[in-house]
Image: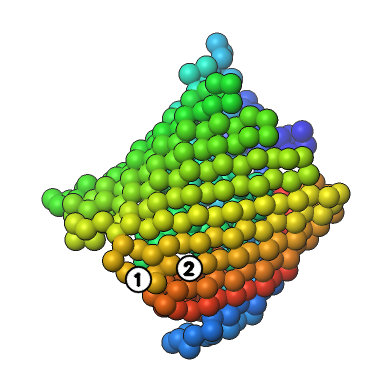
């Protein structure tokens, strides 16, 4: 309630009419001290100590009741560079995160803006919920999932310039659709992306099927991905499985890659223990181009909002695999063919 009152006061100072809306200020501060290594000699460093701002963010969200079950919804969220690290963006407010404006009602929710794709969100129950990574740290499972280690990484991003529709909850089932453009059509390309998911989330069971396609990545070529996710909560913890297939077109030839990931967590009192194992297979036509990742995480909750945590991850690339950490100054210890990357970190997170 206090946050809403503060938000309304701020909004009223700039636009008195905005004070009529139900507005919430929220955010998360998350930083860790970490040591990362690459066992291969490269043009950059093979080891590095650093402090990373793990998608620290600030946001405003709310809705206005329009009557007859209809409401206007909105959200503005920006990443905050807590460390002021030039290699991570420099400016304190440097990346627009999930932000939108739309309508919700008995028909569901429709909005436009910059937002996670349904394909990406399908894994959120495991990546953000069970594991508490939310693709924000070097230990995230997104190092191998949603990418093939060969330049295809849009599956882990948000859909900018996009329109979304989320159906109402129907006995635990929801359908989600999204379409995004790049607003830069040329004589040879008209880049756009389609994404959809069907989700069942009720009681201890969670299941999701996601699909996403990028058209005209280069002239006439498209990238696509299919993801099947399942999770079960047994009270003190959860187990989850992700199986996915990505296809990347290069000069009209599709290079497929399969991957799977098994995750689990356990909660006892203020202690949260989690981990996962991921195996990415070879790309079509390139032997030994996969990788393996194992990650462990421990967190101690001082309160519902404040957590002290430690994490460890290891990425073992096959001979021709070149997967890399997804967060921090990744160029300093970038994954190279056949490299083994490891990292350990200790951090603190506070949500408000």
Q: Which residue lies furthest to the front in this view?
A: 287
Provide the residue designation for mark 2: 291
Provide the residue designation for mark 1: 287
Which secondary structure, mark 2?
A: strand
Could you classify mark 1 by the number of other residues whose Cα lies within 10 Å: few (under 14), some (14-19), or many (20 or more)?
few
Residue 40 drawn at (x, y percent): 49, 85
Could you classify mark 2 by the number of other residues whose Cα lies within 10 Å: few (under 14), some (14-19), or many (20 or more)?
many
321 vs 221, left or right, is: right
Q: Is residue 22 visible?
A: yes
Residue 45 drawn at (x, y percent): 52, 85
User: In percent of the image, x 33 and y 54: which residue is there?
Assistant: 247
Would you identify the image quadrant in which residue 204 lies?
Answer: top right
How many numbered discs?
2
299 vs 28, left or right, is: right
Q: In which quarter of the image is the N terminus?
A: top right
User: In percent of the image, x 35 and y 71: which residue is there?
Assistant: 287
Chosen colour scheme: rainbow
């Amino acid at each position: 309630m206090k946050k809403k009152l503060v938000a309304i006061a701020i909004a009223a100072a700039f636009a008195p009419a905005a004070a009529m809306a139900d507005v919430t200020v929220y955010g998360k501060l998350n930083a860790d001290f970490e040591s990362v290594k690459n066992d291969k000699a490269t043009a950059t460093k093979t080891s590095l100590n650093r402090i990373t701002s793990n998608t620290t963010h600030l946001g405003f969200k709310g809705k206005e009741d329009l009557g007859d079950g209809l409401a206007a919804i909105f959200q503005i969220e920006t990443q905050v560079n807590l460390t002021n690290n030039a290699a991570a963006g420099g400016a304190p407010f440097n990346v627009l995160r999930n932000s939108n404006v739309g309508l919700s009602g008995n028909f569901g929710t429709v909005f436009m803006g910059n937002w996670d794709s349904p394909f990406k969100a399908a894994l959120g129950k495991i990546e953000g919920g069970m594991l508490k990574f939310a693709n924000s740290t070097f230990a995230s499972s997104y190092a191998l999932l949603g990418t093939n280690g060969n330049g295809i990484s849009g599956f882990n991003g948000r859909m900018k310039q996009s329109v979304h529709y989320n159906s109402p909850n129907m006995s635990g089932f929801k359908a989600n659709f999204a379409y995004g453009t790049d607003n830069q059509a040329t004589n040879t390309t008209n880049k756009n992306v389609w994404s959809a998911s069907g989700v069942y989330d009720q009681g201890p069971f969670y299941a999701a099927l996601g699909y996403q396609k990028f058209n005209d990545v280069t002239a006439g070529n498209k990238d696509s991905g299919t993801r099947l996710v399942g999770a079960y909560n047994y009270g003190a913890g959860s187990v989850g499985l992700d199986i996915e297939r990505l296809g990347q077109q290069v000069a009209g030839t599709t290079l497929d890659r399969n991957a799977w990931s098994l995750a689990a967590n356990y909660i006892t009192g203020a202690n949260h223990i989690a981990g996962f194992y991921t195996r990415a297979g070879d790309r079509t036509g390139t032997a030994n181009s996969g990788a393996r990742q194992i990650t462990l995480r421990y967190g101690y909750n001082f309160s519902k909002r404040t957590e002290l945590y430690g994490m460890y991850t290891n990425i073992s690339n096959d001979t021709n695999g070149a997967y890399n950490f997804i967060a921090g100054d990744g160029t300093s210890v970038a994954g190279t063919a056949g490299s083994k990357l490891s990292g350990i970190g200790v951090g603190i997170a506070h949500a408000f």
